[in-house]
Image (cartoon, rainbow, N blue to C red):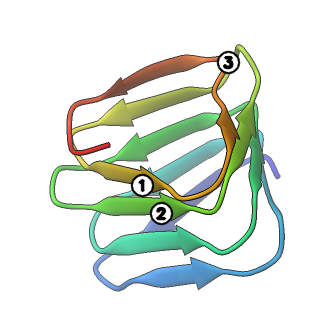
Amino acid sequence: GAGTFVVGAQDGSIAPEFQNSGTVNVNAGTLELQVRANSSGTWHIADGARLVMKGATTTSASVFQGAGDVEITGSATINGGYAVTGTT
């Protein structure tokens, strides 16, 4: 959905399909999406933080950015920007 989703100092895990049309801030810890994510929004992964996705489909408006780590374990179609400087 729209708005801002923030992961702070603790790890988080989301099982239903995740729809992002706003902003996801992974400020610390790990955010694990256990099913595919569909996104037209922004993903910011801070230094030392980690985003784990089972797959993803993004629109050209979607942007992944930050110094954190991103792991995609399933198929992904990334149509937008990708400026993650951590491990991918």
Q: Residue 47's x, y, as percent?
A: 17, 50
Q: Quadrant of residue 85?
A: top left
The kind of residue on which mark 3 rests is Asn
The residue that disc 2 covers is 52
Q: Residue 8's x, y, as percent?
A: 35, 73
In the drawing, does residue 14 fall left or right of residue 64? right
**Secondary element type, mark 2:** strand
Residue furthest to the left = 48
Q: Quadrant of residue 49?
A: bottom left
Report crowding for label 3: few under 14, some 14 to 19, many 20 or more residues within 10 A (C-alpha).
Answer: some
Distance CA(mark 3)–CA(mark 1): 17 Å
Q: Residue 48's x, y, as percent?
A: 16, 60
The kind of residue on which mark 2 rests is Val
Q: Which label number is shown at residue 79?
A: 3
Residues at marks 2 and 1 touching, judged by CB atoms closer than 8 Å: yes
The residue that disc 1 covers is 71
In the drawing, does residue 20 fall left or right of residue 51? right
* Chain-order first, disc 2 or disc 3: 2
Distance CA(mark 2)–CA(mark 3): 18 Å
Question: Which residue is at 69% across, 45% downward?
Answer: 56
Q: Quadrant of residue 87?
A: top left
Q: Compared with residue 54, is residue 12 higher up or lower down, i.e. above or below?
A: below
